[in-house]
Image: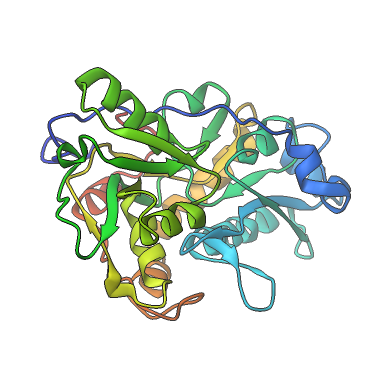
C-alpha cells in the first residue's frame, strides 16, 4: 500500500466530512432526466444487457473534472474516465451499441442521484471518505488533493492560521465547508466562516472583497483562478488542511458492476493509458479556459497508483 506519512497537511489536519444534501435531486434533475432514472441499483449490468442505458451523473461546472463544453456536451477528466468505463461495460455485456444518458447534478444532489437510483455513475470531483462510504461506493481514486485557500494576489494571508478575524468563504454542501467549520471551532481560530451557494459565487466574493479567502480543493482553486479574466489576480496559498481522494461514485450494493468499474480503472492505470488523459486536462491547455493548469501527477497519486485500490486511509 502507498506510504502517506510524508503528506504534510498542516498542524490542524482533520478528516473531512460530508454535508447532507438539502434539495431533492428529482426536482432538480427535471422531467428529461427522470425518463432515464434507474429503477433499482441491483443488477446494473443485467439491466444494460437487457437493453438499458448507462446513466452517468456529472457536474456541469467542476472543471477540469466535469463541465459542459461550448457545444453543451459533458467533458472533463472524470467524464473521460467514465467514458472509458462505459466501454468496459459494453464489452462485459456484449452491448456494443449501449447508450450513455448524461444527467447533470450539483453539490446538493449528486449523492442522492446514486443512492435513489437516478444514476449508475457520478463523474466529477467527489471525495471518497468514511461517511460517504456508508451510503455509496467509490472506485480507485483518479486524483489526490486537499483543502487550501484562494486569495487575492495582493493578500498578506499565507495560511489558515492568518485568517483570525477575517472572512473565509466555502461552498454550501461541500466537505471543505464542514472541515473549516470544525477546524475553526476546535482550535478557536476566530474565523468568520460564511457560505456561498456555489463555487463561482465564492470566487466572486474574494474578488469583490466580500471574503478574504475561499477554502476548497486546491485543484479546483487553480482551475477557478485560470478561468478568470486575469488569472494572476488570484493565488492559492497555505498547506493542505485535509487530504482528499477523488473518485468516481457508484451504487454501494452492486458488486458485479463495481468489479467492472474497478477492473477498468486498474487497467487504465497499469497500462499507463490514464497518463495521457491526465496530461490532457492538467498539463496542456484545455477547455473551458484553454489555459494549462500545469499540475503534474503528484507524488501521492503516483504512490497510490502503484497499488491501485478503492481503500483510502481517511
* Residue 31 relative to residue 165: left or right: right
Res 78 visible: yes
Q: Residue shown at 48%/43% (left/top)?
A: 126
- Pick whichever, 210 or 178, lies toward us: 210
Q: Farthest residue in the top direction?
A: 186
Quadrant for the C terminus, please: top left
Relative height, residue 77 to residue 240 (above, below): below
Where residue 289 sits: x, y (%)? 46, 77
Where residue 42 sits: x, y (%)? 74, 30
Where residue 161 sits: x, y (%)? 15, 37
Q: Residue shown at 50%/27% (left/top)?
A: 132
Quadrant for the N terminus, please: top left
- Pick whichever, 245 or 8, lies toward us: 8
Res 276 visible: no
- Pick whichever, 170 or 244, lies toward us: 170
- Pick whichever, 245 or 253, lies toward us: 245
Amino acid at each position: 500500500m502507498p506510504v502517506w506519512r510524508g503528506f504534510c497537511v498542516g498542524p490542524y489536519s482533520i478528516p473531512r466530512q460530508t454535508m447532507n444534501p438539502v434539495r431533492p435531486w428529482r426536482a432538480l434533475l427535471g422531467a428529461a432526466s427522470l425518463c432515464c432514472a434507474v429503477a433499482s441499483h441491483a443488477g446494473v449490468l443485467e439491466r444494460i444487457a437487457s437493453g438499458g442505458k448507462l446513466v452517468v451523473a456529472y457536474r456541469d461546472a467542476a472543471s477540469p473534472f466535469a463541465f459542459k463544453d461550448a457545444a453543451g456536451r459533458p467533458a472533463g477528466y472524470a467524464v473521460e474516465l467514465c467514458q472509458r468505463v462505459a466501454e468496459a461495460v459494453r464489452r462485459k455485456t456484449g452491448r456494443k451499441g449501449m447508450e450513455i444518458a448524461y444527467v447533470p447534478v450539483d453539490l446538493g444532489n449528486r449523492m442522492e442521484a446514486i443512492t435513489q437510483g437516478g444514476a449508475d455513475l457520478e463523474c466529477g470531483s467527489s471525495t471518497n471518505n468514511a461517511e460517504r462510504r456508508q451510503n455509496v461506493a467509490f472506485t480507485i481514486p483518479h486524483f489526490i488533493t486537499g483543502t487550501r485557500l484562494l486569495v487575492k494576489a495582493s493578500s498578506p494571508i499565507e495560511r489558515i492560521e492568518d485568517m483570525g478575524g477575517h472572512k473565509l468563504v466555502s461552498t454550501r454542501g461541500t466537505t471543505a465547508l464542514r472541515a473549516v467549520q470544525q477546524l475553526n471551532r476546535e482550535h478557536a481560530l476566530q474565523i468568520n466562516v460564511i457560505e456561498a451557494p456555489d463555487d463561482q459565487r465564492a470566487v466572486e466574493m474574494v474578488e469583490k472583497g466580500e471574503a478574504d479567502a475561499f477554502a476548497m480543493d486546491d485543484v479546483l482553486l487553480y482551475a477557478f483562478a485560470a478561468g478568470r479574466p486575469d488569472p494572476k489576480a488570484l493565488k492559492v496559498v497555505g498547506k493542505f488542511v485535509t487530504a482528499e481522494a477523488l473518485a468516481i461514485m457508484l451504487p454501494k450494493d452492486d458488486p458485479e458492476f463495481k468489479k467492472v468499474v474497478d477492473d477498468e480503472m486498474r487497467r487504465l492505470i497499469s497500462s499507463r493509458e490514464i497518463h495521457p488523459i491526465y496530461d490532457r486536462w492538467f498539463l496542456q491547455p484545455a477547455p473551458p479556459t484553454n489555459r494549462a493548469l500545469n499540475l503534474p501527477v503528484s507524488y501521492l497519486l503516483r504512490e497510490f497508483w502503484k497499488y491501485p485500490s478503492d481503500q483510502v486511509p481517511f
